[in-house]
Image (spheres, grey):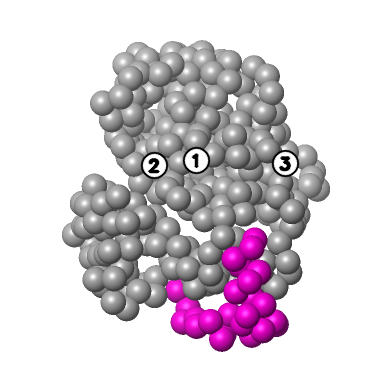
Amino acid sequence: MAVRQQDPAAEFTSYATRSLEATHDALAAHYYDMRLSLVGPAEDLSTSLSVLDLGSLTVGEVGFGTEIRTGFAAPGAYHVAVPVSGCFSVQQGRGDVVFATTGNAVFFDPAQYIRIDTWSPHCRALTVKIDKRALHQTLEALLDRPLSRPPDFGPSIDVTSGPGRSWAQLATWSLFEPATSLGLLRRPLIRGRVEQILLEGLLLAADHPYRQDLEVPAPPMRPAAVKRVMDVIQERPAETYDAARLARIAQVSLRTLQEGFRRHVGMSPMAYLYDVRLQRAHDQLRVSAPEATTVSDVAHRWGFVHLGRFAGRYRERFGEPPSHTLRGA
């Protein structure tokens, strides 16, 4: 039987149980449907789990009191875990085994099957699930341009110093702040800002191909008219647009808008729109089950009426037909 405590105002929940089934149910409710098996003595199982819902992030700390083994997959998420004590190992698909220690966080993508092993009996870990689309959109906002392809993240983050340590400390603070009476995280405005800082901070702490771009000084601010159109396209890319409507949104002439995009974005407004749509279609195809959707469904959802043109643009942008991306998911 699990003892569960919940604070709806702070989106905070905690569990304590000696049941393997209750442990599975608690993890499935907030993280993943895991295959849990006991390696250590069953009588030592003493699960404690604290979880904070921060919208696009789930921040938690978990310990089992005994050695366990587990496996799971979840295409729509990234995950970062760092032991507060003890250690464990992670293997992504058929990749190399990576060890998580108190100084080394592991970053993995559950689009591949994840195997967690050698979870030491006294291991407790800070464990953060991150919505993949939210992290991609945050990266696009920081770069101020669409992603040419989703980032491939390195398997480890140093949490002994620098951005990695700051990020882990902020995640830990956010998890235990709900215990503060009338604390800041009870205010939606602050929760939203902490969520955004954790997303942006992770992109500065983890290794990925765009990391160097984030380190350079920000480019000069784009004109308000250009930014206004870019924001609308990012928020509602599937809507029907033409050049005239985009000019009305920008509140400038079509010629002025086109020149602004050429100088400050490097492409026309309509080319930018198609680029954003292609990226959203690519993200959806990567996480969709082939038996549940089709390339045509995804193309139409993101505003592509002509399937042949969509497939051609998609292959040019991502180096493979959209059907290959879907089958790979």
Who's the residue at 37% across and 38% down the image? 110
Closer mark to the observer between disc 1 and disc 3: 3
Q: Nearer the viewer, residue 122 or 202?
A: 202
- Please, what secondary structure does the residue beneath circle 2 have? loop
Tell me, for residue 158, which label it has, or none. Answer: none
Examine the image and state in which quarter residue 312 appears: bottom left
- Mark positioned earlier in the residue sequence (1 or 2): 2
Q: Nearer the viewer, residue 119 or 17?
A: 119
* Residue 218 visible here: yes
The number of numbered badges drawn on the structure is 3
241 vs 90: above or below? below
- Identify which amino acid the numbered label 2 is placed on: Tyr
User: Magenta segment, which residues?
Assistant: 238-264
Tell me, for residue 217, which label it has, or none. Answer: 3
Who's the residue at 63% across and 26% down the image? 164
- Mark positioned earlier in the residue sequence (2 or 3): 2
Who's the residue at 32% across and 60% down the image? 314
- Please, what secondary structure does the residue beneath circle 1 have? strand
Who's the residue at 30% across and 50% down the image? 319
* Distance CA(mark 1)–CA(mark 2): 9 Å
Q: Main secondary structure of the magenta part?
A: helix
Q: Are marks 1 and 2 in contact (CB under 8 Å)?
A: yes
Tell me, for residue 32, which label it has, or none. Answer: 2
- Mark positioned earlier in the residue sequence (1 or 3): 1
Q: Nearer the viewer, residue 49 or 255?
A: 255
Task: Give the residue pinned by disc 1.
Answer: 129
Residue 228 point in image, percent of width and height: 67, 71
Residue 194 on the magenta span: no
Residue 7 point in image, percent of width and height: 64, 48
